[in-house]
Amino acid sequence: MARKDSITGKLDWLTILLYALLVLIGWLAIYSAVYDDEERNIFSSSLNSGRQFQWMVASVIVAFVLLIVDSRFYITFSYPIYVFILLLVLSVMVIGTEVKGQRNWIRIGGFQMQPSELAKFAVALAVSKYLAGLNVDIRKWRDKWKAFALIAVPILIVAVQGDAGSAIVFVSFALVLFRDGLESYFLVIGASVIVLSVLSLVVEKFLLVGILFGLALMVMYFARRNTKLVMAIAGIWLAASLYAFSVDYAFNKVLKPHQRDRINVLLGKEVEKGRDWNIRQSIIAIGSGGATGKGYLQGTQTKLKFVPEQSTDFIFSSIGEEFGFIGSLVIIGLFLGLFFRLLYLAERQRSKYSRMYGYCVTSILFFHFLINVGMAIGVAPVIGIPLPFISYGGSSLLSFTILLFIFLRLDTQRYETMR
């Protein structure tokens, strides 16, 4: 009993309060998105709100179990959990159920589970375990590649299964490596790749290569006395040119038509009529909310089902329509409060494992938040990822709950030095 009391006293209740508020707001927003005159019972299992409530109860139970498990369990079994979850993700190729054209779900009784969601906390455990290892220095190439591999494996598995959105999310774990000392030039390389990718899609390829060649010649002229630098610049130009053409090939030959349309919409290109329906209707719904919104359950765009997937991918548009700019700011404020609180908790850890895990949790939640809200307002591609704790989805709610409460459990032993 004394042990239970000590854990309760050390829990960060502010974080739990923010979690509870977001989950409750999400539940009410889901009900609003599916509300109709035929079925008004928020607990009805025929509605997404009723099914979400069942997952909320399950998540509370799981959170309680996570808090009573000794913190050293997560440290000791980080790698076994990682391997087990990845095998579970692989198993959907054999025993998976197809949902909306993608075979990445497992049916358990009357529920469906998406293992790729669970892989997020498994990768967080494994990355934290590795970075906290003795003699691991992320500035050494040998250690870099091992950390990159832990992140790359689930990306490849999930991408092969056709879930590009979930695969991209795992890239956010790379941000944790910078906290551990990864050189800043990797950020420059990453930003350059993103800029070059966009330019490759909006500028004619030979013109782009010509512009890059001109820039390379200018730099080589000023560096002409340094032979090694001139050769390096020439190599960078060649690599950038080849990448520009590979982007065009991947865009037209690898991506599916709906994925190409989503990128073209974001880039402002013309697409077939109706292909940009989701984004346009989401923007209209948010804009129609004005400053204070139309009121709960009063959103016309929401009630008339103009926005597809409104209880999942575009849940923020429902909030924007019914609660307006002020309500949207409140939601954003709650998320920002949660992120800053998690960063504070991560920095006060004496254990490197706990600190790295805290940054993993913050990175994955922030990435989801940034992309999902960006999708709703038309500044990010529609890649189908949920808004943490708010979007409908049992797998995502359970995954985010596990992520968060493992960290809260680790935080209760923040004064201990654990490897």
Image (cartoon, rainbow, N blue to C red):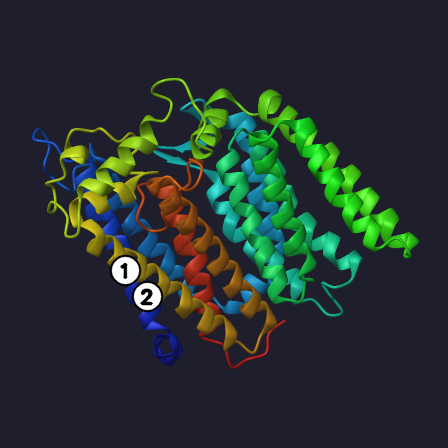
x and y percentages locating residue 164 in the rendered image: 52, 34
With respect to residue 20, does 210 lie above or below?
Answer: above
Depth check, front residue: 102 or 175? 175
x and y percentages locating residue 122 in the rendered image: 54, 51
Locate the C terminus and report the quarter of the image it occupies.
Answer: bottom right
Give the Cα distance between marks 2 and 1.
Answer: 6 Å
Q: Residue at x 78, y 62 (%)?
A: 140
Depth check, front residue: 70 or 333? 333
Q: Residue at x 69, y 37 (%)?
A: 211
Give the image quarter of residue 20: bottom left
Locate the N terminus and report the quarter of the image it occupies.
Answer: bottom left
With respect to residue 276, does 69 lie above or below?
Answer: below
x and y percentages locating residue 300 in the rendered image: 13, 34
Specify whether 19 is left or right of 71: left
x and y percentages locating residue 158 in the rendered image: 56, 36
SS class of the residue under badge 2? helix
Which residue was labeled with disc 2? 16
Which amino acid type corresponds to the residue marked 1 in the rendered image?
Ala
Which residue was labeled with disc 1? 20
Give the image quarter of residue 84: top right
Camera sees residue 154: no
With respect to residue 151, does 415 lie above or below?
Answer: below
Label drawn at residue 264: none
Camera sees residue 372: yes
